[in-house]
Image (cartoon, rainbow, N blue to C red):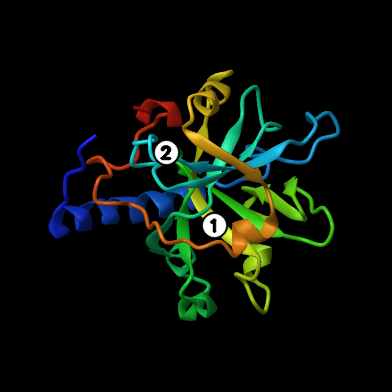
Amino acid sequence: MTRRRVSSVRSGLYLRCYVTGALCALLLLSGSSRPTAAADAKPLTAILLVARDNLSDPSFADSVVLVMNNLGAAPVGIIVNRPTPIPVSSLFPSLKRLAQLSDKVYFGGPVEFETVWFLFRAAKPPEHAIPTCDGVYLSADRELLLELLGREKPMDGLRIFVGHAGWAPGQLQAEIAAGAWTLKRAEAEAIFNGRSEHPWPSPATPKGGPRQSTPGQGLT
């Protein structure tokens, strides 16, 4: 797939839309509508997927995705290495102490881009969150996020994402069999200390922002 260069003016318009979407997304956070720990949850299986060169969808090219099987009928993932230009402080303008931080919001995937998710490290299982790996938890609970941001080091072991990735039943297995992904062990160090050298959006990101799609639509 040939990638077209996007002009700086056009990119600026896109980013303003993304920032607006992220600010609106924060208002949608709630403890009841997002994942919570449950006694009847499926057994946890989490892996890291690293995109190979033949995965040409610009939303997933060069991506590292934390994939979990216990959030629904099919796997759900969070892209962990695609920072956006949106500062975390822009989501919380009333929290003046965040203005000094340089941390960015990450692009979690093109599905439900209006939602906000976060991964964080914790010594013991918190409420309104589900385990992923090695003391790392996933949540979209607003009160929990505000609690984490109220710490002395608010972004220590915390990453915030807009959107997520998703697959239809059987789709991910087919993509792996087709050689689109390399599988790696899910580890906290890879999530929080991995190199984020692939910012989002890239010059090839389609006009209008992320597509409401699943990863397989970019395979060649």
Q: Which mark is residue 110?
A: 2
Instruction: List x then y, in percent, for residue 64.
Output: 51, 48
Q: Determine if residue 214 is in view.
A: no
Left-right relation of 211 to 27: left
Task: Give me the residue at 68% from left, 31% from top.
Answer: 69
Left-right relation of 178 to 76: left
User: Does dot 2 land on a helix, a strand or a loop?
Assistant: loop
Task: Give me the residue at 82% from left, 62% from top.
Answer: 123
Instruction: List x then y, in percent, for residue 45.
Output: 73, 36
Specify few, some or many for label 1: CA neighbours under 10 Å numbering under 14, 14-19, or 20 or more: many
Q: Nearer the viewer, residue 109 or 194?
A: 194
Instruction: List x then y, in percent, for residue 58.
Output: 33, 41
Task: Give me the residue at 60% from left, 69% from top.
Answer: 155
Residue farthest to the top, as pictured: 170
Residue labelled with disc 1: 160
Question: For the N terminus, which image quadrant?
Answer: top left
Q: Amino acid at mark 2?
A: Pro
